[in-house]
Image (cartoon, helix red, strand yellow):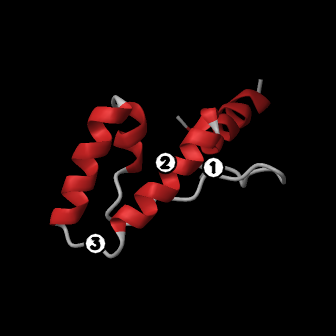
Amino acid sequence: VGNVPDDDDDEQDFGNLPLPPLPPGISLPPPPPPGVVLEDDITVDDTADDQTSVELVEDADTPSPSDFQSQWEKRRASDPSLA
């Protein structure tokens, strides 16, 4: 019976620990470059949001947004899993 509280403490402490490091071979996707709204681009309807995000980026005067946008469009077109 004396060991039961220790087990509970271990589980609670485990929940408060930061996430463990990713196993080898699995990596998080890189964050999008600043000024480019990638996640909205993907989750919202593609054609409607592409125009909106390009306009927003141009208003923000971010360097070469259209260049990145065109590269991303090519990648997304060639890899259906990115769409």
Q: Please provide percent x and percent y for residue 44.
A: 34, 31
Q: Is residue 56 above or below residue 77?
A: below
Do the residues bearing badges 3 and 1 touch, measured as CB atoms within 8 Å?
A: no
Work out whether mark 1 precedes mark 2 in sequence or the reverse, and give the earlier one.
1
C-alpha gap between disc 2 and disc 3: 18 Å
Q: Amino acid at mark 1?
A: Leu
C-alpha gap between disc 1 and disc 2: 33 Å
Q: Amino acid at mark 2?
A: Glu
Q: Please provide percent x and percent y for residue 74.
A: 55, 49
For disc 2, the marked residue is: 73
Work out whether mark 2 precedes mark 3 in sequence or the reverse, and give the earlier one.
3
Q: Is residue 43 left or right of residue 11?
A: left
User: What residue do we see at 84% from left, 54% from top?
Assistant: 24
Q: Is residue 6 left or right of residue 57?
A: right
For disc 1, the marked residue is: 19
User: What residue do we see at 31% from left, 64% from top?
Assistant: 35
Quadrant of residue 5 in the image?
top right
Toward the viewer: 35 or 12? 35
Q: Please provide percent x and percent y for residue 39.
A: 40, 43
Pick the quarter of the image with the N terminus.
top right
User: What residue do we see at 62% from left, 44% from top?
Assistant: 13
Q: Please provide percent x and percent y for residue 70.
A: 45, 56
For disc 3, the marked residue is: 62
Do the residues bearing badges 2 and 3 touch, measured as CB atoms within 8 Å?
A: no
**Badge 1 density bin: few <14, some 14–19, many ≥20, Cα 10 Å:** few
